[in-house]
Image: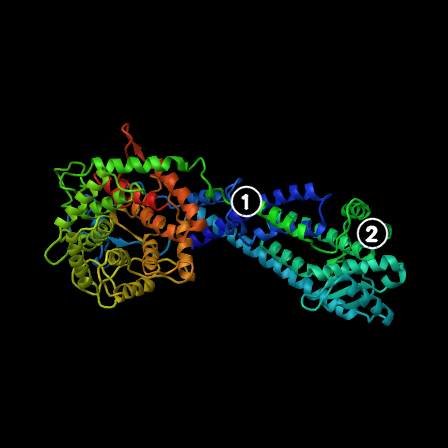
């Protein structure tokens, strides 16, 4: 519930920020162009701030950003609603059910016993004071929106009843005049003319069947030349479909009833619609009728006050006195020829002005910012690669202990750590491996190959560590073979693939066991799918149904409504070690979801094709990387897999993740005088001594984005 409310608040902040900047930009443009441009173009441009309240158009165009960053308050809100972790961790001896265990390939030092299990954290996020306030805000917004919609429906129903009862049939000569003017105006739709006793001003209505409501006395009191201008003005509303525009504005105001920008934008849009119809009517009667047109407007406005019974979707001709002077002065201005509608220059002006406004409203996360200086990232990547090079052991491995001669974790993490480090070095540099990097990669791959058993499995048989370590090693060997082909390595891969396929549960996926036991989880299954995909690209023949059946398991574990993949239960939050569950809340991670997205991509699926995957990507955007030791939000493996998944999604999601990831990793890095850099082992899965693991994950994340 808290995640959904945070998403709602983030959306409202983003849309409100974009609309505010669009209103400022559009207002400046209207002020600059009001004496030089046609009102038709400016009337459509004035509608943009209201459109941005409901449609994120500024994200859909490939534009830069030069303004405010709407994601900044959204991240601040998310930080305030984040779970405050407990100050003291749970004792390391606490154990939970084996059915809810977590892979020990990331096991910390305290997990010396291979039988230690972890638990899956609850499927709901804890409620905090911040989320309670958010619930109240959401309830207030719903109440206000419902009240606004109820008022809108009441006005529509009441005015329809009043107008229907009071409508009179016009005389034949009045109908004939009206029909001639309709054809002259260029309005191709049939419009019904209704005379209403006591109506102070003409107005248009009818969403599907246009209607022009006019006072009974209109044809009797106005001279012919003034009457023609008034009717042409109303027909211009029909031709422009301003009734639909007015209804859209009222619907937006119902949702944004609390937002002053929405009311200001609506007032500005309504004024420019009236100016556009004034201009269209003047073009119909001829520029010489400027004085008579102004006279008609004055004559009607002197007695026009918009009645409460008028429908919300009506477009009345009457205007407030403060706007009347502007309309008259524009009608009398002889420097500009009146236009009946949008011209080609006007269309081009609207497109150019809209693109410029969207560039201003676009989140600044699209460009480098002071909080995420991308210029430092290449040097940071080189520094991390240098640190990994200098901490590789003579036999090719990367140890998980600060003292390479004392491996207190029984090599539980060394297969996974070495595999991740090999893959990280393979990605540096992008333009080809240096001799030093190539040597390190070959040594690391040789160590992984030396850890292979006769049955094809790679790494020690240490309960939870076996299959996840094997998956990472298989992927690292395959990617190394793609860069540096080797016949021996291909033979190792064939045996490793055969071992993995034997361990798969029939028609399902993988978990800890090296033999099928019916137990599955999303993280090992997805990791194995990625490894098999890399081996297949290496040229290993693998029946494709293995991956498709494993993907079916991941789909079963994914909640279609939220897009979240659970660890062993559908749609639940991720996992943590028992003794770290309070210190590092699971609410900060969507690693199973990220891995599932990557598994889909490995089978050639587009992340934009499915509503479920789009929701999964949105979940990852809600869980941006955040460096906070106090809150316990650091999770290198999630950042690594999340960055790789978001890179496949691209677009705004990738831009937001890139900015947050760079900010987090730049803040947490430990730089050295020789130019190297690494990250401390203080995340959800590390303990002191696992700095190579943390650094390899961080470097892989930076390479993805």
Q: From the viewer's perspective, is residue 646 above or below residue 196?
A: above
Q: Position of residue 651 (x, y in %)?
A: 44, 50
Camera sees residue 314: no
Q: Which residue is mark 1?
A: 359
From the viewer's perspective, tell me whether residue 521 is left or right of residue 50: left
Residue 96 versus residue 506: which sits nearer the camera?
506
From the viewer's perspective, tell me whether residue 191 is left or right of residue 520: right
Quadrant where the N terminus sits is: bottom left
The crowding category of the residue bearing disc 2, from other C-alpha atoms within 10 Å (few below 14, some 14 to 19, many at least 20), is: some
| CA distance for labels 1 and 2 | 38 Å
Going from N to C along the chain, the mark reached first, 1 or 2, is 2
Residue 464 placement: quadrant: bottom left
Q: Residue at x 43, y 61 (%)?
A: 611
Q: Which mark is residue 287?
A: 2
The crowding category of the residue bearing disc 1, from other C-alpha atoms within 10 Å (few below 14, some 14 to 19, many at least 20), is: many
From the viewer's perspective, tell me whether residue 363 is left or right of residue 205: left
Q: Position of residue 537 (x, y in %)?
A: 26, 57
Residue 325 versus residue 579: which sits nearer the camera?
325
Q: From the viewer's perspective, is residue 561 above or below residue 134?
A: below
């Amino acid at each position: 519930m808290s995640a959904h409310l945070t998403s709602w608040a983030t959306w409202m902040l983003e849309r409100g920020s974009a609309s505010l900047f669009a209103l400022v930009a559009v207002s400046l443009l209207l002020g600059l162009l009001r004496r030089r441009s046609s009102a038709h173009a400016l009337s459509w441009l004035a509608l943009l701030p209201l459109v941005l309240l409901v449609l994120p158009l500024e994200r859909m165009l490939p534009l830069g950003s030069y303004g405010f960053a709407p994601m900044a308050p959204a991240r601040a809100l998310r930080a305030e609603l984040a779970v405050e972790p407990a100050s003291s961790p749970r004792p390391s001896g606490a154990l939970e059910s084996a059915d809810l265990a977590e892979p020990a390939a990331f096991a910390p030092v305290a997990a010396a016993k291979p039988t230690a299990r972890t638990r899956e954290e609850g499927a709901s996020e804890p409620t905090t004071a911040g989320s309670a306030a958010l619930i109240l805000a959401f309830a207030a917004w719903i109440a206000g929106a419902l009240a606004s919609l109820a008022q809108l429906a009441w006005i529509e129903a009441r005015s329809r009843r009043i107008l229907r009862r009071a409508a009179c049939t016009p005389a034949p000569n009045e109908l004939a005049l009206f029909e001639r003017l309709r054809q002259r105006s260029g309005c191709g739709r049939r419009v019904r003319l209704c005379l209403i006793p006591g109506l102070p001003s003409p107005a248009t209505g009818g969403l599907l069947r246009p209607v022009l409501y006019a006072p009974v006395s209109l044809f009797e009191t106005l001279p012919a030349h003034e009457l023609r201008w008034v009717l042409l003005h109303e027909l211009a509303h029909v031709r422009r479909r301003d009734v639909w525009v007015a209804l859209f504005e009222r619907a937006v105001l119902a949702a944004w009833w609390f937002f002053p920008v929405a009311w200001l934008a609506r007032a500005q849009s309504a004024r420019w619609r009236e100016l556009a119809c004034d201009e269209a009517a003047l073009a119909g009667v001829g520029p010489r009728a400027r004085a008579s047109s102004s006279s008609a407007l004055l004559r009607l406005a002197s007695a026009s006050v918009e009645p409460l019974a008028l429908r919300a979707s009506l477009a009345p001709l009457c205007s407030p006195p403060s706007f009347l002077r502007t309309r008259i002065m524009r009608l009398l201005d002889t420097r500009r020829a009146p236009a009946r509608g949008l011209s080609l220059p006007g269309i081009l002006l609207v497109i150019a002005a809209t693109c410029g406004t969207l560039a201003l409203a676009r989140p600044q996360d699209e460009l480098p910012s002071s909080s995420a200086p991308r210029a430092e990232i290449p040097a940071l990547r080189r520094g991390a690669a240098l640190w990994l090079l200098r901490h590789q052991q003579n036999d090719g491995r990367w140890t998980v202990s600060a003292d390479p001669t004392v491996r207190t974790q029984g090599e539980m993490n060394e297969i996974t750590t070495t595999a991740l480090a090999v893959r990280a070095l393979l990605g540096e540099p992008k333009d080809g491996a240096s001799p030093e990097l190539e040597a390190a990669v070959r040594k690391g791959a040789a160590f992984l190959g030396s850890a292979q058993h006769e049955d094809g499995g790679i790494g020690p048989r240490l309960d939870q560590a076996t299959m996840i370590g094997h998956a990472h090693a298989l992927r690292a060997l395959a990617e190394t073979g793609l860069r540096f082909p080797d016949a021996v390595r291909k033979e190792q891969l064939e045996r490793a693939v055969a071992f993995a396929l034997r361990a798969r549960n029939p028609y399902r996926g993988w978990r800890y066991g090296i033999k099928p036991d019916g137990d599955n989880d999303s993280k090992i299954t997805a990791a194995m799918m990625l490894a098999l995909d890399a081996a297949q690209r290496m040229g290993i023949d693998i029946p494709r149904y293995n991956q498709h059946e494993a993907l079916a398991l991941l789909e079963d574990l994914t909640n279609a409504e939220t897009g979240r993949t659970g660890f062993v239960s559908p749609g639940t939050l991720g996992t943590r070690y028992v003794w770290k569950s309070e210190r590092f809340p699971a609410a900060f991670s969507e690693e199973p979801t990220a891995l599932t997205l990557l598994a889909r991509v490995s089978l050639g699926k587009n992340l934009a094709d499915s509503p479920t995957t789009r929701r999964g990507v949105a979940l990852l955007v809600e869980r941006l990387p955040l460096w906070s030791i106090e809150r316990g939000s650091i999770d290198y493996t999630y950042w690594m897999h999340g960055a790789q998944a978001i890179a496949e999604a691209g677009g705004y999601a990738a831009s937001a993740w890139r900015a947050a990831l760079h900010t987090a990793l730049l803040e947490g890095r430990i730089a050295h005088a020789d130019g190297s850099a690494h990250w401390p082992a203080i995340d959800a899965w590390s303990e002191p001594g696992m700095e190579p693991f943390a650094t390899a994950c961080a470097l892989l994340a930076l390479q993805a984005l």
